[in-house]
Image (spheres, helix red, strand yellow):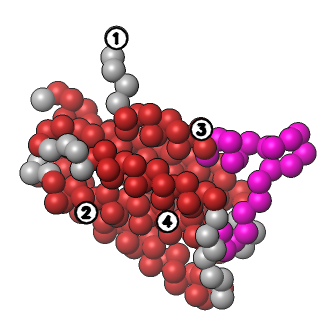
């Protein structure tokens, strides 16, 4: 029987958390996030991936992993800039909320786990986390953040980043397959 990694457990927890938030609390109501809260979650989710990519740059010696990490930093910093520019234009101040707090708490646990690993074990754990994280973020953007966005420009920004997130997921899956072949 295959052992379940802590990264897989973390990802499952995130997916369940997102599913609970996106699912109606009763047949007629669902959780509501203001545009300020949606903006906060978007920035937090991107910053988490940047922070984990920086950790990969510190700990990995695998050129493919290092290149992937740099792509994550570049792309997610660009999204944060777009989001920051948009919220400034709209006069919205990102507002902390339970979704963002849960993402930060889970990211701290993941970072702690990743810091216990080195070499090929780190690379595999980092990339496995990236696969799971991008799956969870895509689900959150499509099922929670976009539907909760009232402002058309904010919704448009979120919709525009989904293809990039899917590309990141595919890249991470390809890298995961390469690492598993070794």
Tell me the distance, in whole angstroms, between the alpha carbons under discs 4 and 3: 18 Å
Tell me the distance, in whole angstroms, between the alpha carbons under discs 4 and 2: 15 Å
Q: How many marks?
A: 4
Tell me the distance, in whole angstroms, between the alpha carbons under discs 1 and 2: 33 Å
Q: Give the image location of residue 130, x and y in percent.
A: 35, 47
The residue that appears at 86% across and 49% down in the rendered structure is 29
Using the rendered view, name the quadrant where residue 121 is placed.
top left
Q: State if disc 2 and disc 3 touch (CB < 8 Å).
A: no
- Point out the tag, 1 or 2, that comes first from the N-terminus: 1
* Mark 1 nearby-residue class (10 Å; few <14, some 14–19, many ≥20): few
- Point out the tag, 3 or 2, that comes first from the N-terminus: 3
Q: State if disc 2 and disc 4 touch (CB < 8 Å).
A: no
Which region of the structure is painted magenta? Answer: 18-37
Q: Quadrant of the N terminus?
A: top left
* Mark 3 nearby-residue class (10 Å; few <14, some 14–19, many ≥20): few
Tell me the distance, in whole angstroms, between the alpha carbons under discs 1 and 4: 36 Å
Dot 1 corresponds to which residue?
1
**In front here: 16 or 89?**
16
Dot 2 corresponds to which residue?
54
Dot 4 corresponds to which residue?
44
Tell me the distance, in whole angstroms, between the alpha carbons under discs 1 and 3: 23 Å
* Mark 2 nearby-residue class (10 Å; few <14, some 14–19, many ≥20): some
Q: Give the image location of residue 70, x and y in percent.
A: 24, 63
**In front here: 59 or 38?**
59
Residue 110 is inside the magenta segment: no
Helix, strand or loop under label 2: helix
Q: Give the image location of residue 32, x and y in percent.
A: 77, 59
Residue 30 is inside the magenta segment: yes
Tell me the distance, in whole angstroms, between the alpha carbons under discs 3 and 2: 27 Å
């Amino acid at each position: 029987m295959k052992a379940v990694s802590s990264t897989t457990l973390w990802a499952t927890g995130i997916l369940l958390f997102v599913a609970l938030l996106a699912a109606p609390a009763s047949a007629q109501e669902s959780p509501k996030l203001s545009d300020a809260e949606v903006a906060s979650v978007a920035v937090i989710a991107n910053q988490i991936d940047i922070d984990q990519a920086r950790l990969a740059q510190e700990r990995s010696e695998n050129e493919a992993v290092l290149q992937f990490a740099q792509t994550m930093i570049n792309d997610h910093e660009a999204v944060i800039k777009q989001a920051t520019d948009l919220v400034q234009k709209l006069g919205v101040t990102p507002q902390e909320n339970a979704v963002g707090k849960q993402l930060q708490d889970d990211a701290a646990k993941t970072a702690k786990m990743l810091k216990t690993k080195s070499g090929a074990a780190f690379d595999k754990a980092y990339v496995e986390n990236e696969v799971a994280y991008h799956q969870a973020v895509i689900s959150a953007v499509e099922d929670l953040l976009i539907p909760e966005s009232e402002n058309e420009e904010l919704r448009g920004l979120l919709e525009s980043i989904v293809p990039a997130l899917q590309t990141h997921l595919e890249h991470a899956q390809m890298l995961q397959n390469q690492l598993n072949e070794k």
